Image: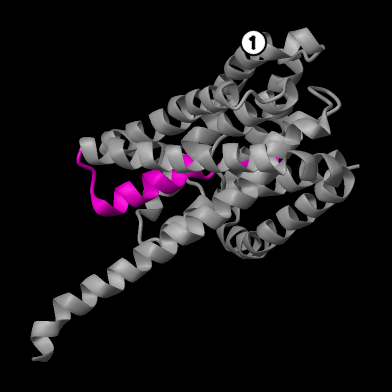
Amino acid sequence: MAIWIVLPILTLLMFDLGLTLKFEDFGKVFRSPWPIAIALVGQLILLPLIALGLAWAFKLPPVFFIGLVLIACCPGGSSSNVFSKLAGGDVALSVTLTALSSVITLFTIPVIMSLATTMVGQSVGITLPVGNLIKQNLLLMLVPVLLGIGMHYAWPNAAEKTDKVLGKLAFPLLLVLITVFYIQHHKTIIDNIGILGVCVTALILVAIGCSSLLSRLVKTGDKQRRTVVIEVGMQNAAQAIAIASSPFIFANEEMAIPAILYSLMMNIVLLIYVGVLRKLDKRQLAEATEPISQ
């Protein structure tokens, strides 16, 4: 049942992402190479490696091991643009990174998931039909994005109005999806919430810490560093759920549970992160204007 909810949601989210993109966004990689490189390394390489390490350290069962790696190697979520704006980050950079990660992960997900499945899945009968994974990602990820970009150029006013509607629907639709999954798998979730909750939260916190450190090492600006942290921490949970529960790929809804928990925890952690940043900005603004008032 849940798969027939997540597939339309994922398609709508990717179409909405395309509505906000311009082909010029991909050219920004040449104008701001360091922040983009750091964010992509953090998201596409560091996050999956951290997930592999944590899944091994916590001795997760194969289905959750693969599920944790799956959410870690998915692209950034479209909500990251909103979070970057709220955090006072570089929104243009966020849009570029979301676009790039959505395209690049079409090629990296099959490689990483093949590795994870070979490591722990085959012993319990979990296999990865790589061809089906690539076909589904192209159909549900690339095609909707290209259609959205096409609408953006062909009918810009209609694209803007559509984006406003879909942007408001994204989070409620994800809540519906999470609710459906909880109702169907509440016993499994409750039985494993301790170890999985800690593991997922650790993944988010370590990823945020490492991405912030990398950004400081290459001396990116404050706005860019905030965006890098958000982009690395925020993953497309809908895609992970679609891959895990798709009858053409893993056909295993329990494998989607790490993505469900990740979706919940990443919003909590990043909302706290944004709240702290906004307080710091207000304090700095007050300190900067204090001598003027005197």
Name the residue rendered at 38%, 64% in the picture. 276
Q: Main secondary structure of the magenta part?
A: helix
Q: Which one is nearer the viewer's eye here, 280 or 5?
A: 280
* Magenta stretch encompasses residue 245: no
Q: 27 or 134, which lies in front?
A: 134
Quadrant where the N terminus lies?
top right
Residue 176 position within the rendered picture, expressed as x and y whole percent measured from the top left: 79, 56
Residue in front for this viewpoint, 61 or 27:
61
Q: Is residue 131 visible?
A: yes
Q: Position of residue 156 (x, y in %)?
A: 56, 58
- Determine whether the residue tagged by mark 1 lies in a helix, strand or loop: helix
Hey, which quadrant is residue 115 in on the image? top right
| Residue 237 on the magenta segment | yes
Label 1 sits on residue: 119
Asked if residue 191 is positioned above or below residue 86 in the image, the reply reads above
Type of residue at label 1?
Met
Q: Which region of the structure is painted magenta? A: 219-238
Residue 238 falls left or right of residue 45: right
